[in-house]
Amino acid sequence: MKKKTLLLLFIANIILISMGWILAFYSYPRLPQRIPLWVNFFGQQVMMMKKSPLFFVYPIIQTLFCSGFWLVSRIGHYKPSREGQADLIYKKRMSFLSDLRKEFVYMVLIFFSLIFIHLQRGIIFLAYGKESGVDKVYFYTLFGIILILIPLYRLRAKLPFKK
């Protein structure tokens, strides 16, 4: 697996986290004095509150979520070394699996970042009364893609390793 792929996925995550913060900082001063606390995802009543820094909870959670999973992806599962040629093949296989795990985490984090940005956008639009909240089709599609990625990467990990 190429390190360029991991770098590009990492950069994509940084860009999405940055976009979440930019969206928050750009829209906060322009919001009305009463904003929704949460999107009316299941048709419940919209809870309004006075505009406060609590609005920044979405980019904070997005950043913490992505940072936490990035740290988890860095943890290796390398076992004690074995002797001879088998050790070299084993190290290559473990390196491949480690890169594959990082790629999976970065891909999933891209979709989770899109979910957080979508929730934040939904709150902004609700504050202005432009939309009713979250676009459910888009929201469920993002979760569906994440669920599809899980067996895809498990299958890739089980494929024969090229030495």
Image (cartoon, rainbow, N blue to C red):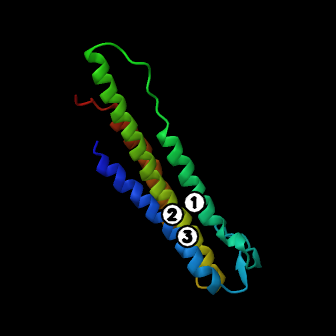
Q: Callout 1: few (<14), some (14-19), or many (20+) C-alpha neighbours within 10 Å?
A: many
Q: Amino acid at mark 3?
A: Trp
Mark 1 or mark 3: which is in front? 3
Question: Left or right of 155: which side holds 32?
Answer: right
Q: Say which quadrant the N terminus sits in.
A: top left
The reply to whether callout 2 and callout 1 are in contact (CB within 8 Å) is yes
The residue under the point 32% across, 13% down is 83
Q: Secondary structure at mark 2?
A: helix
Q: Residue at x 53, y 47 (%)?
A: 69
Q: Which residue is mark 2?
A: 17
Task: Give the residue displayed 49% in from the left and 70% down from the top.
Answer: 19
Q: Quadrant of the C terminus?
A: top left
Mark carried by residue 62: 1
Residue 101 coordinates in the image, percent (x, y): 42, 40
Give, as a three-letter code, the residue at label 2.
Ile
Q: Which class describes the residues within 10 Å of circle 3: few (<14), some (14-19), or many (20+)?
A: some
Residue 37, given in percent of the width and then of the height, sits at: 71, 71
Label 1 – label 3 distance at C-alpha? 9 Å
**Image marks 3 and 2: residues in contact by CB distance under 8 Å:** yes
